[in-house]
Image (cartoon, helix red, strand yellow):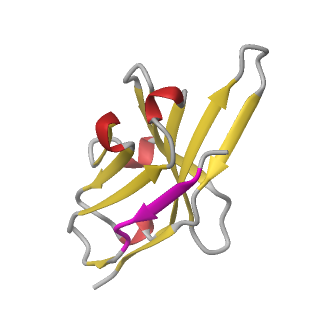
Amino acid sequence: QVQLVESGGDLVRPGGSLRVSCTASENIFSINVMGWYRQAPGKERELVADITNGGSRMYADSVKGRFTIYRDNAKNTVYLQMNSLKPEDTAVYYCNARKYTEYGEQYDYWGQGTQVTVSS
């Protein structure tokens, strides 16, 4: 079991910046992929960005050029730096940890979520 604790959600004005953090209960180098998802009211949860333990990154089209995901293995923490925030970025942001076994099984672990609100 991987436990994830998010922090950093806040109310921010359009155009502003915010960084959210996700700290894992184990060495994140052992986790194949760590990602950030978000869910806005009335919408499905969507992938925002993820990063593999090899350092490869992927971003949703809606956040490319504005958001950056990065990891600090020494702190077992993954960050999502969000710049040029828009009202449509408002959502609960969830941290995800994905592990694959040698048998091809996939295990997903989730944090409790942190609220990001972009509003003037």
Q: Nearer the viewer, residue 80 or 66?
A: 80
Q: Nearer the viewer, residue 103 or 62?
A: 103
Give the farthest residue toward the bottom. 120
> Which image quadrant: the N terminus?
top right
Report the span colored magenta. 3-9
User: Which residue appears at 78% of the width and 25% of the height?
Assistant: 105
- Relative height, residue 55 to residue 23 (above, below): above
Q: Quadrant of residue 107?
A: top right
Residue 4 is covered by the magenta coloring: yes
Spot occupied by residue 86 in the image (x, y as percentages of width and height) = 33, 66
User: Which residue appears at 65% of the width and 47% of the height?
Assistant: 109
Spot occupied by residue 23 in the image (x, y as percentages of width and height) = 42, 52
Residue 56 is covered by the magenta coloring: no
User: Which residue appears at 44% of the width and 71% of the height?
Assistant: 90
Q: Nearer the viewer, residue 43 or 11?
A: 11
- Relative height, residue 19 to residue 108 (above, below): below
Q: Is residue 88 visible?
A: yes
Horizontal relation, residue 82 to residue 4: left or right: left
Horizontal relation, residue 10 to residue 26: left or right: left
Horizontal relation, residue 117 to residue 83: left or right: right
Horizontal relation, residue 107 to residue 120: left or right: right
Spot occupied by residue 50 in the image (x, y as percentages of width and height) = 47, 37
> Which image quadrant: the C terminus?
bottom left
User: Which residue appears at 34% of the width and 76% of the height?
Assistant: 10
Q: Is residue 51 visible?
A: no
